[in-house]
């Protein structure tokens, strides 16, 4: 009897995506490429990641070259991808691996690296070392719920989903299986308009014929919190703008920014009526833009000529501020 995994692998061999960090037919020969792609793919789509991955690998072709680079340069190659703590963790991880002299191959060792949780560890072990790890992300959860017609809210059936996903995982070609189930979720069993007629599991799927297929999986959506802040364009007589390096911990750490806070920082600053809206994973932030003339580089900042601002790595949020303010 042909198993579900075999059906999926057959479909993948013919239809799976060719991606710059992927090989078909077993483990990737370069675990470093898998590592970089896994960090970039956290919270970011495949389509967005492709050009960033290619540029990054051209500049840092080996783990040694990444480990030897400055964090500032790494940020420059990450600019636009967002979630910069990933870049910092990837850089630290490269340094740890170079220091220990080998790429870790066990779950316990991979989890000791910086910025790697259970999902990324499973992906690395499956894709780089062909280990029978079960990779479970939003795509996989959706497929498992539809395949089994699970209609309970996702957060109530996490263990059940894992159990079913593990039972399905192929142990002969885990690397291809992990890529295949991702592709099935991205290309066929999509959140909207799933293409069931193209699905290798169409005759096994318990919810294929349901009219409300798109409502599986069931999610309880929490509204995003709204926050308000104040951002300051501080300019000296030479027309230079004050920027500062954000402290090493927390949101947007290690990047340059125009001073901002959720509290008002300067009572003498002038309000501009311009605002910048940015949506983070867990909240929405509206920054109100203020201007201030000053000759003092306060708040550990430095004055930089406007034409040089793009030399400093900044978050997408700060680029939005720059666009609106200048
Ligand atoms: S048959 Fe349709 S709903 Fe079922 S797994 Fe395939 S694409 Fe998803």
Image: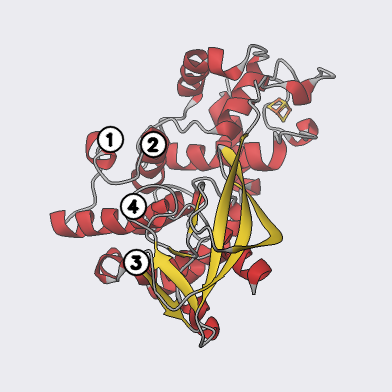
Q: Which mark is residue 122?
A: 2
Residue sticking out furthest to the bottom: 238
Distance Cα–Cα, label 4 vs label 2: 17 Å
Which is more foreground, mark 3 or mark 2?
Answer: 3
Which is more foreground, mark 3 or mark 4?
Answer: 3
Q: Which mark is residue 300?
A: 3
Distance Cα–Cα, label 4 vs label 1: 18 Å
Distance Cα–Cα, label 1 vs label 2: 8 Å
Which is more foreground, mark 4 or mark 1?
Answer: 4
- Which element is circle 3 on? loop
Q: Decide which of 113, 321 is in the foreground and name it.
A: 321
**71 shown above or below 279:** below
Q: Decide which of 129, 313 is in the foreground and name it.
A: 313
Which quadrant would the C terminus be assigned to in this image? Answer: bottom right
Tell me the crowding category of disc 3: few under 14, some 14 to 19, or many 20 or more residues within 10 angstroms, Cα based: few
Which quadrant would the N terminus be assigned to in this image? Answer: top right
- Which element is circle 4 on? helix
Residue beneath label 1, please? 107
Tell me the crowding category of disc 4: few under 14, some 14 to 19, or many 20 or more residues within 10 angstroms, Cα based: some
């Amino acid at each position: 009897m042909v198993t579900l995994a075999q059906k999926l692998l057959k479909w993948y061999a013919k239809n799976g995506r060719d991606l710059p960090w992927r090989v078909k037919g077993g483990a990737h020969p370069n675990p470093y490429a898998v590592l970089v792609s896994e960090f970039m793919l956290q919270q970011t789509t495949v389509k967005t990641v492709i050009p960033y991955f290619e540029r990054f690998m051209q500049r840092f072709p080996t783990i040694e070259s990444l480990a030897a680079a400055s964090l500032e340069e790494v940020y420059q190659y990450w600019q636009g991808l967002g979630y910069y703590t990933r870049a910092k963790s990837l850089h630290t991880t490269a340094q740890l691996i170079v220091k220990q002299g080998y790429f870790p191959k066990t779950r316990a060792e991979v989890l000791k690296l910086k910025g790697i949780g259970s999902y990324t560890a499973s992906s690395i072990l499956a894709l780089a070392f062909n280990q029978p790890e079960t990779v479970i992300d939003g795509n996989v959860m959706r497929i498992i719920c539809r395949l089994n017609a699970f209609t309970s809210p996702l957060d109530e059936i996490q263990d059940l989903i894992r159990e079913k996903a593990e039972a399905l995982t192929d142990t002969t070609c885990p690397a291809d299986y992990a890529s295949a189930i991702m592709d099935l979720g991205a290309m066929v069993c999509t959140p909207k308009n799933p293409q069931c007629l193209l699905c290798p599991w169409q005759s096994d799927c318990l919810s294929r014929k349901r009219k409300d297929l798109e409502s599986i999986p069931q999610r309880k959506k929490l509204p995003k919190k709204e926050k308000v802040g104040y951002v300051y364009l501080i300019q000296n007589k030479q027309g230079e703008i004050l920027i500062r390096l954000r402290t090493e911990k927390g949101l947007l750490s290690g990047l340059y920014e125009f001073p901002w806070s959720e509290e008002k920082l300067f009572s003498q600053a002038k309000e501009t009526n311009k605002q910048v809206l940015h949506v983070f994973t867990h909240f929405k932030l509206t920054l109100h833009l203020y201007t201030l003339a000053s000759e003092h580089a306060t708040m550990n900042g430095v004055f930089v000529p406007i034409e040089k601002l793009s030399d400093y790595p900044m978050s997408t949020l700060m680029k939005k501020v720059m666009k609106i303010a200048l």
